[in-house]
Image: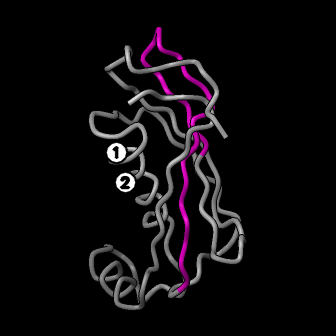
Amino acid sequence: MNFSLGQQAFSRRTFTREDMRAFAALSAGTTGVPESVPGPLIGALFSYLLGVKLPGPGTNYLKQSLDFLAAAPVGEELTASVTVTRLRPEKHLVDLETTCETANGTRICQGRALVYVEDVEQLTMQPAES
């Protein structure tokens, strides 16, 4: 797979009340069932995208920052996306923008990720086609 500026990957997920109960059961120190989707579960959406879709298997996380802008409603479909914003093939690095939005377009979270991709020959500097 070739990587290009502007290239994107998406994932959609609806977290249920049962998911929130399971999260509460696994989280030390959590009291009660969360009323909104906790940050770690939203962060996991980006982890999935980076490790499975873009850049994909073999990707190594180096850095991630997330800014939470609004509560993520339980039971509402969320769309997480990652977008290639910079390629540094000489260092095997890919910078990506990360966002998560509700079905009506409310931005829940935004941030950046920096990943290491060993197979530098697959990186290209060409802009993504529209």
Against 18, is 1 above or below? above
**Amino acid beneath label 2:** Tyr
Residue 96 horizontal/vertical position (percent): 56, 37
Residue of label 2: 48
Q: Which residue is farthest top?
A: 90
Residue of label 1: 51
Range of residues picked out in magenta: 76-97
Please name the residue shown 43% across and 42% down the image: 54
**Amino acid beneath label 1:** Gly
Q: Secondary structure at mark 2?
A: helix
Are dots 1 and 2 in contact, CB under 8 Å?
Answer: yes
Q: Which residue is farthest front?
A: 130
Against 61, is 9 above or below? below
Reply yes or no: does residue 47 show up in magenta.
Answer: no
Please name the residue shown 55% across and 31% down the image: 95
What is the quadrant of residue 22 in the picture? bottom left
Going by the image, does 80 lie left or right of 57? right
